[in-house]
Image (cartoon, rainbow, N blue to C red):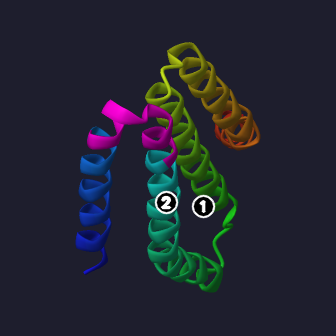
């Protein structure tokens, strides 16, 4: 199973980073970020198949897939934001991590505005 490979890689990298942090802290950060990128790539490869299957089912059903696209984009923004914020925290930059999280939240809000307006218009149509 792929999850055990991912967790093993993370565990081994964590041990290496703990050891390296005593002698070369800058290498420890580089290795942690590199491991994060590798893990993120492995996860994306694994999740693409179910996402394409769901998207295909939605398209075949004739349902508007804009809602799915917005949800998928929001999920991607959330994961990337979390990755960047955690990397900033690992580097000791808590203030930058908070700014990254704020930017991610704003991006998700901006992404959801058209969807929210569409739902609001539909609800107002029922009221009238």
Q: Earlier in the sequence, mark 1 or mark 2?
A: 2
Report the residue at 66% width, 79% height from top: 62
Q: Which mark is residue 68?
A: 1
In the image, 57 versus 90, the foreground residue is: 90
Image quadrant in which the C terminus is located: top right
In the image, 17 versus 63, the foreground residue is: 17
Q: Is residue 40 above or below residue 127?
A: below
> At which x and y percent is residue 118?
73, 43
> At which x and y percent is residue 32?
43, 47
Task: Specify whether residue 66 is painted magenta.
Answer: no
> At which x and y percent is residue 11?
24, 55
Q: Residue furthest top?
A: 95
Is residue 47 toward the left or the right of residue 109 in the image? left
Report the residue at 50% width, 28% height from top: 91
Report the residue at 50% width, 17% height from top: 94
Badge 2 is on which residue? 40
Secondary structure under the numbered disc 1 in the rendered image: helix
Q: Which residues are magenta?
A: 19-30
Is residue 24 toward the left or the right of residue 119 in the image? left
In the image, 38 versus 21, the foreground residue is: 21
């Amino acid at each position: 199973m792929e999850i055990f490979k991912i967790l093993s890689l993370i565990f081994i990298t964590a041990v290496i980073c703990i050891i390296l942090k005593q002698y070369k802290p800058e290498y420890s950060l580089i290795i942690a970020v590199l491991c994060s990128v590798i893990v993120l790539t492995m996860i994306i490869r694994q999740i693409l198949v179910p996402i394409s299957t769901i998207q295909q089912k939605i398209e075949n059903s004739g349902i508007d897939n804009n809602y799915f696209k917005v949800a998928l984009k929001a999920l991607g923004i959330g994961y990337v934001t979390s990755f960047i914020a955690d990397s900033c925290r690992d580097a000791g930059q808590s203030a930058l991590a908070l700014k990254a999280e704020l930017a991610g939240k704003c991006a998700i809000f901006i992404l959801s505005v058209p969807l929210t307006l569409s739902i609001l218009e539909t609800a107002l149509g029922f009221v009238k």
